[in-house]
Amino acid sequence: MTAPVSNTPYGIIYDAYHDAGLLGLGEEPNSEQLTEGMRRLCDVINLWQTQGLKLFLLVDQEITLTAGKQTYTMGLAGDIVMAKPSRVLQAYVLITSGLVKRPLVPLSWDEWMRLSQVSGNNGAISSYFVNKQSALLEVSFWNTPDVEEATNTAHVLLQVQVDNPINLEADMMFPAEWRIALRWGLADDLSTGQPEAIMTRCAQ
């Protein structure tokens, strides 16, 4: 019998099936159970991310500035090609000459709408505004960068969704401390129809 590696989808699925009472001591999940377990594990991960649990990663994304260009998009069809980020948490401008960071102030929809002039006032960036679209995330800077500012780079701290696992034997992209939560979350999902004692243990 092959011992499952701990922090892999296979290891989590293996333990979850045992926790849910669907496999006995020494038994291994078959291919159908592994397929179902992987699908359900992805469902648990995707659901928990919508509920505020920190099943995500933070990325400092560099944006190459262009003089006169105010808005930059991120997504599969964006200026920066990537999976659409969930959120922008912070932003700063990195001044290339001295590698000094200039923090930027986030603008709400109300503050953005109340700006008397959002274009034609090129200069140093002081603020940023995030507009979430269905397929893209737009970041607009105020002021619009001028030629001098375009020699610097903007940086946004992104909250990005971890890619769903596709390889049973690959390490999960989550820290190891999330393994037990994912294991019991999956066991709770799998235990439907099992005896009450097992369902209660998995739910707790």
Image (spheres, helix red, strand yellow):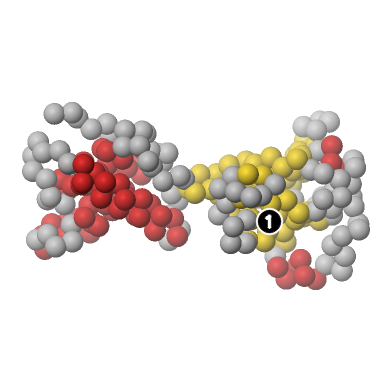
User: Picture quarter containing residue 129?
Assistant: bottom right
Q: Position of residue 90 (x, y in %)?
A: 65, 50
Task: Identify the residue at the far top of this view.
Answer: 2
Q: Position of residue 64 (x, y in %)?
A: 75, 40
**From the viewer's perspective, is 112 left or right of 178?**
right
Report the quarter where the C terminus lies: bottom left
Residue at 63% over, 61% down: 132
- Residue 182 in view (yes/no): yes
- Residue 148 vertical placement versus 140 (above, below): above
Q: What secondary structure is found at the residue carrying circle 1?
A: strand
- Residue 152 vertical placement versus 132 (above, below): above
**From the viewer's perspective, is 153 left or right of 179?**
right
Amino acid, disc 1: Glu
Residue at 31% over, 37% down: 168
Q: Position of residue 183 (x, y in %)?
A: 27, 47
Residue at 77% over, 35% down: 100
Q: Residues within 10 Å of mark 1 (few under 14, many from 20)?
A: many
- Residue 105 in view (yes/no): no
170, 16: nearer the viewer: 170
**From the viewer's perspective, is 120 left or right of 35?**
right
Q: How many discs mark residues in the rendered view?
A: 1
Q: Position of residue 85 (x, y in %)?
A: 57, 51
Circle 1 is placed at which residue position? 138
41, 7: nearer the viewer: 41
Residue at 81% over, 38% down: 152
Report the quarter where the N terminus lies: top left
